[in-house]
Amino acid sequence: MPELSIVVPLFNEEENIRPLYTALKPVLEGTGRPYQVIFIDDGSTDNTMDELERLSALDPNIAVLSFRRNFGQTAAFAAGFDYASGEIIITMDGDLQNDPRDIPRLLEEIKSADLVSGWRKDRKDKLLTRRLPSIAANWLIGKVTGVRLHDYGCSLKAYRREVVKNIRLYGEMHRFMPVVASWYGVRVSEIETAHHARARGKSKYGLSRTLKVLLDLITVKFLQSFSTKPIQAFGPLGLLCAAAGFLISLYLTLEKIFSGVDIGGRPLLLLGVLLIIVGVQLVGMGLLGEMLVRVYHESQGKPIYALKKVIGPEKK
């Protein structure tokens, strides 16, 4: 059984596959540990799959997973995690911008951690379209989630097997793995890693990902704080709206009774009614969320906690 599993998603990277394999193999052999390299072809439209088939025929340590279409990097990582059998799982990009020679340093650091994230301190990307948005996103993610890393977007990471096997990925959530893992008390560490400019092929990243990151950050924050108690997210806001609407309506009612003022055409009346309706809806959403959470956990037998270890007799 391999001790190391290297997970590499690929999308239209036919020019980089052979150089990546050439750089990766001596590093992995130098660790002295049995390993497997899992390439995931994420629906490539070039000759990526042909190159992977030729490599797998030459090296029994290579496994290839081919998607029917392009599902995205998060889905590719999820497939790699499901297939991996190593005790340590390392992820990296397939464009040769991550340096395989950093793998031994990740393995050394993970001896005292459960998840090690790379930090591309001297990043070789365009300033306006890649580096500045990344700096802003990293700061915002750290501020919102409380898990502070310099570089969430670096794909070069090392995980203990039990970390990835207990996490489910959706959407574009792979960059938030350290945040999700931290909810379970996982020890997260970060080390500086090398970064190279892309020499072949075209980048699959751009400013369009900024909006996706912001939307995923909202999802992560909600799950981090309210995944098992949604009423506490919607309830206070709903009660606040309902209370404000009630006070506005009460004021208008008193004004009508004691002053005889016509309130039928006043915008304030519409605002008061609207706030009451919105407040009731928000509280109702919270209650529906509570029922869904209970159905989800109880029907599938999913605990709302995570055990680190058990000392004593096994459960009968």
Image (cartoon, helix red, strand yellow):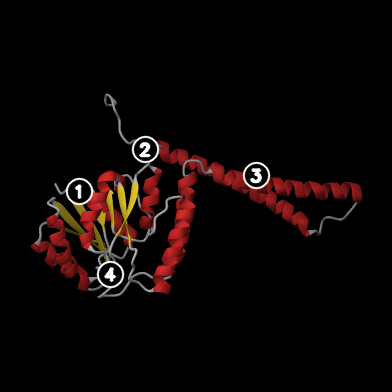
Q: Earlier in the sequence, mark 1 or mark 4?
A: 1
On the question of residue 103 being in view, the answer is yes
**Secondary element at image label 2:** loop
Name the amino acid type tagged 1: Gly
**Secondary element at image label 1:** loop
**Residue matched to label 1:** 86
What is the distance, in whole Å, between disc 1 and disc 2 at their CAs?
Answer: 22 Å
What is the distance, in whole Å, between disc 1 and disc 3 at their CAs?
Answer: 50 Å
What is the distance, in whole Å, between disc 1 and disc 4 at their CAs?
Answer: 27 Å
Please give the label number shown on residue 195: none
Please give the label number shown on residue 239: 3
Relative horizontal placement of residue 133, taking residue 271 as reference (left or right): left
Labels 1, 4: front one: 4
Q: Earlier in the sequence, mark 1 or mark 2?
A: 1
Labels 2, 4: front one: 4
Image spot of residue 291 (x, y percent): 50, 40
Tell me the quarter of the image containing the C terminus: top left
Q: Earlier in the sequence, mark 3 or mark 4?
A: 4
Please give the label number shown on residue 306: 2
Labels 3, 2: front one: 2
Q: Earlier in the sequence, mark 3 or mark 2?
A: 3
The answer to the question of whether label 2 and label 4 lie on touching residues, with beta carbons closer than 8 A, is no
The answer to the question of whether label 1 and label 3 lie on touching residues, with beta carbons closer than 8 A, is no
Name the amino acid type tagged 3: Leu
